[in-house]
Amino acid sequence: MFSETAVSVKNICKCFEIYDKPFHRLWQMLFAGKKRFYKEFHALKDVSFDVKRGECVGIIGRNGAGKSTLLQIITGTLQPTSGTVETYGRITALLELGSGFNPEFSGRDNVWMNAAVLGFADADIKAKYQEIVEFADIGDFIDQPVKTYSSGMMVRLAFAVQVMLDPDILIVDEALSVGDMFFQQKCLERLKKLLDRGTTILFVSHDTALVRAMCDKAAYLKNGTLAAYGTSKDICEMYQNDSTAAGSAAGQWVTHKTNVSTAPSENALFRIDDELDKKVTERSGSRELEVTAFDLYDMSGRRIQECPVGERVKLVISLAANADIPAGAQIGVLCRDERGNDIFTTNLVNFQKFLPGISAGSRGTVEWEFVMPVFGTFFFSMGIKPDKLSNNFYDRPFNAATLKTIKSDPLDTTGALLSIAPENFKINMGYIS
C-alpha cells in the first residue's frame, strides 16, 4: 500500500552497556543479571518524528548527541532498546567510510557486491555500472584493491554506488565532508536530482548553511533527546543560538578581532592588490577596464576576511581604466558558498544604473553593502561588460575574494535577509593622484 510517509520513528530509545573492564562482561553473563557490572549510557531517549516521501531532512546536533546512532537504527544496522522504526521503500545508506567494502576486493568487485546486497539484479547492476564508475571518477584504481584507496577515493566510490542506484530513501552520515570541494559540488547536484525524482533523504551534517539550503525540515538532537523538529531555517537558528550561548558560558568564544589593514580614509578606498592574480582561480577579458583590487570591509572601514554572522559588510571593487571607456558598462557580482551553491548575485542593471564614461588613466571604486546572515565560507566573483547585452568582458576574475562568517556574541538573525538595496550601492569614479 502506498504511504505518504517514508520514515516513521516512534519512541526510539537506545541504551548501551558500558563496562570498565573486559572481564566484567563475563561476570555479567555468569551472574545472569542478578548483579549489574556495567553502567548505562542512554544514547537516545524517546525520539519520535515522521518524514514524508520526497522530503530532505537534516539531523543536526553536537558530537555525541546521538545522530549517528539514530541513522544506524533507521537503516537497521543497529537495534533500538525500545521503540519502532517503519520505512517504506528501498533504503541505501552511507554511514561510515568504506562500510560494506571488502578491502581485499577491487573497486569493481565491491560495486557489484554492494549493489547485490541492496537487492539489485545482475541486469540492473550492469545497466548502472558505467554511470557509477564515471561518477566516482577514480580512473584505473577501479581495478585495484580497495585497501589501496585514499579516504577521498573511498567515499567517491561508496557515494557513487548509493546514489546512482536511485534509492527510495537515501541516508548519509557526514560522508561528504571527506571529499574535495569539487566532488562535494558534484554530490550535491546529484542529491538535488534525486529530490526532484521523489527520493527521501536524511543526512547528518554540522554545516547549518548546507542544511538550510538543501533541507525542508531538520531534527535537532540534544543529549540524546529530540530538542526540536521543524523547518530547517527555524531549527538551524535554534541550534546556532544554543551553540553560541553554550560556547560563551564555557569561555570558548572571545571577542573577535579581524585581520585588518590600516583603516582607509573616506576617499582612499581605491587600492592596487599585487596579489590579485595569485588569488583568483580564473581570469579573462580585454583589461581595458581592469579590476585592481576586490576587498571586503566592515562598517568601521577595516579590510577583513572574517566577520561575525549577521553583520553588515561593504564590498569594494577598485577599477583602473587603461583606455577610454564609454558610458554604459555593467558590473555583476556573484557570491557562492564552498560547495558552489549560488548565495546571491547582483549587478548594476538591478538598480537601473551603469558606469559613467571613464577616461583612460581614471581610477575609482564601485561599492555594495550587504548582510551575511548565515555561517560559512563564501567566494566572490565578478565581471565587467561594455553593456548588459554584450558577451565580451573588460575583466572577469573568479574567486577574487573570500569571506568567512564566524560566531561572536549571540545574534538575533531571525528574518535576516541578504540585503542589497539601491541605497546600499555607490559608484565613485574619478582621477586619483
Image (spheres, rainbow, N blue to C red):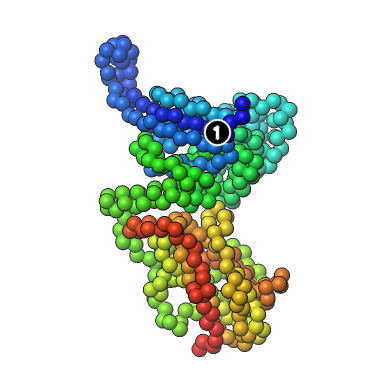
Residue at image coords 35%, 49%? 242
Quarter of the figure with residue 67: top left
Residue at image coords 38%, 31%? 46
Left or right of 57, for residue 32? left
Q: Nearer the viewer, residue 418 or 254?
A: 418
Quarter of the figure with residue 322: bottom right
Q: Nearer the viewer, residue 242 or 190?
A: 242
**Res. 64 in view:** no
User: Which percent across, then down, holds residue 342?
Assistant: 57, 58
Tell me which amino acid carries mark 1: Thr
User: Which percent across, then down, holds residue 190?
Assistant: 62, 44
Residue at image coords 48%, 57%? 377
Q: Nearer the viewer, residue 88 or 331?
A: 88
Residue at image coords 59%, 86%? 361
Please rate how many residues cluster around mark 1, counting C-alpha atoms within 10 Å: few if below 14, some from 14 to 19, many from 20: some
**Eyeballing the image, is 253 above or below 273?**
above
Left or right of 175, for residue 139? right
User: Which percent across, then down, holds residue 223?
Assistant: 34, 37
- Report the quarter where the N terminus lies: top right
Q: Nearer the viewer, residue 150 or 423?
A: 423
**Eyeballing the image, is 278 above or below 124?**
below
User: Which percent across, then down, holds residue 137?
Assistant: 65, 43
Left or right of 81, for residue 39? left
**Eyeballing the image, is 408 above or below 292?**
above
**Res. 128 in view:** yes
Dot 1: element: strand
Q: How many marks?
A: 1
Q: Which residue is mark 1?
A: 5
